[in-house]
Image (tube, helix red, strand yellow):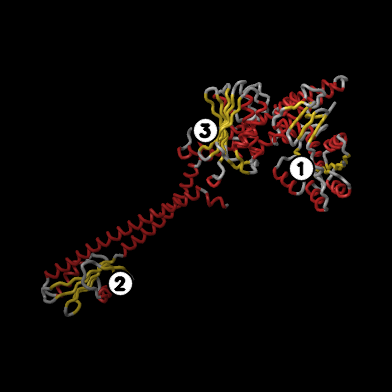
Amino acid sequence: MAGWRHSITLRLSVAFALLATLVFAALGLYFSRAADDHMAELDAHDLFGKLALIGHVGTQEQSAAAFAARLGDALIGEHGVIATVDGKKGPIFKWPTAELAEPLAAAGVSLGRTPIRLALGGTEYRVIAADMETPWGGTAHVVVGRDIRHHTDFLDQLQHDFWLAIAAAALLTAVVGALIVRHGMHPVRDIARAAGRISAGQLAERIPEQGVPPELAELVEAFNAMLGRLEESFKRLSDFSADLAHELRTPIHSLRMQTEVSLGKARSTDEYRDLLASNLEEYERLSRIIADMLFLAKADHGLLIPQTEPLALVPLCERLIEYYGLLADNVTLQLSGDDLTVGGDRLMLERAIGNVLINAIHHTPAGGEISIRVQAAGGTAQVSIANSGRPIPEDALHRVFDRFVRLDSGSDGSGLGLAIARSIMRAHRGDIAVTVGGQVTTFHLSLPLEGDHTAL
Amino acid sequence: MKILIVEDEAKTGDYLKQGLGEAGFAADLVRNGLDGMHEGLAGDYDLLILDVNLPGLDGWQVLKALRAAGRDLPVLFLTARDQVEDRVKGLELGADDYLVKPFAFSELLARVRTLLRRGRAKEAESLSLADLELDVLKRRATRAGRRIDLTAKEFALLELFLRRQGEVLARSFIASQVWDMNFDSDTNVVEVAIRRLRAKVDDDFTPKLIHTLRGMGYVMEIR
């Protein structure tokens, strides 16, 4: 159950319980202090009252014996009070009895402005002492004590109750907290359920964004956005599979037809030869599509690893122009730019630039021109291939690098050339882009410049 | 010239054997690595065509065993996977050339001939067929005594044809030999180049020397 260690419910409940304990303990401490202070004040008030009484009786009587008798009368009915009055010649008065007051006399309490606590014979007292001048001569030492057992009992009870209350509160907040948290987690469970319903076939489903608490809205939005991206790439993938099947089926279908019809009756050797030759051409096309598809699949899986060597771009373009230029009838090809060197796989880069060049040649009308420029731009080497002619429609620009996209139906290519060019550029940490201006379409191939490897 | 083919795919093996036989080679076929190793060690072959993916002993192991035993016959290996590591590994183990399946048979034939020709007498400096003559050193071509003006690439193309008289040259092979373009692109550049060469070398003359074999490539010969 290691998962419990990370349970939000558990952690929050424990935190609630701790908080409740702390708050109650602080309150309890404060109240018992306040009660204690209040009791002490009451006791002091009482004791000062007794001192005043004794003082008053002391001024009324002319002898110690009369004083003791009168004081005894005055204190009748006072429970929990003990008192001693000592004169110069010995004890004058003990209350309530000589035995009970004995420990107080023995304690020898000194004079003080506030009462002190004293334990006498197992009982808690608050006591205070004072001296008074007597009419019969000399000073008498008065000590008055009050039994505060009922106060301490009350405080003990209070403390005990508080501990119980703390324990109960901690338990209750933990349980209620857990319930609240579980309830609060409802939206999360809802989201999880919604997410659980989504499978490859239902990528169009989204987690409803209404009614989601604001704290979770961001999560849901991010999740839905991820689904959107997944759906798009999934759609692309299945479109691509469908396209692939179509691309392979068409030549295979024509091969089959051709062969079946030819075998339908006896023919001359020349006719058979023609058939086989035509079949061979189709096979070649099929193999090329498959090889290109494998190349792209490898690129998709990050398995396209260029064998890097320094390559001078201008001579490389010159060679490509010399080769593919043969296809450019009545089209001017121009190469200009700086003498830049990049690190790259010669075979792959030739293929990428070559594919873009073939594309440009195919789309340039007679009398048009293609200009190829090599230049440095912001830490990258750029090869721009611009051709005149009918520009690519704005809304189709983003699709030109997709697979099996042929923007003009007359094109006889496989529709993979530019996709391959892009894969190659990306495997080289470069990129390819296309821009259109007026009657000119320009492809920009960019590569990190040689010597710039550390910056990447 | 004796060639040993080690190939486990039945159809491929049979047609390789037939094709090489019809091209004038004595070809033997074995269908697994172990037989390939024994035959390669015992037989007196001039060339080995070795499939990499074999049951039992694979192509690499066969190649290693042969080289370890001091057999230095040229080896051309065939691989179905176009992985750079495969190529590098094969060449490191001492193979001389490789082809990625599927390949054009004419391409294989051209490679086989190159490998068998390697290390033989120095290449001729003047080449000819019928009344076509080529002086390689002076870069001069004449037909029926008339000087023909050729670009550098046209000259290289014509030289290739003359050196390979009677051999079918696949378009990919021509692109690789003349332009050093080593990937199979879906264009008819070679076709255009040959049309232009024909215009200069063949159009105004008889007999015609450059012939098209539909679906396969081109051949230079007197028919």
Residue A355 picture location, percent across and down: 64, 31
Q: Mark 3 = which residue?
A: A208
**Residue at left offset 11%, top offset 75%:** A136
What's the mark number on residue B97?
1
The answer to which quarter of the image holds residue A262 is: top right
Residue B148 in view here: yes
Query: Horizontally, is A288 left or right of B45 in the view?
Result: left
Amino acid residing under circle 2: Leu
- Mark 2 → mark 1, Cα distance in angstroms: 115 Å
Query: Horizontally, is B26 left or right of A184 in the view?
Result: right
Amino acid residing under circle 3: Pro
The answer to which quarter of the image holds residue A148 is: bottom left
Against B48, residue B143 (above or below) is above
Query: Within 10 angstroms of label 1, few (less than 14), some, or many (20 or more) residues?
Result: some
The reply to whether label 3 and label 2 mark residues of one chain is yes
Against A171, residue A298 (above or below) is above
- The residue closer to the viewer here, A354 or A324, is A324
- Mark 3 → mark 1, Cα distance in angstroms: 61 Å
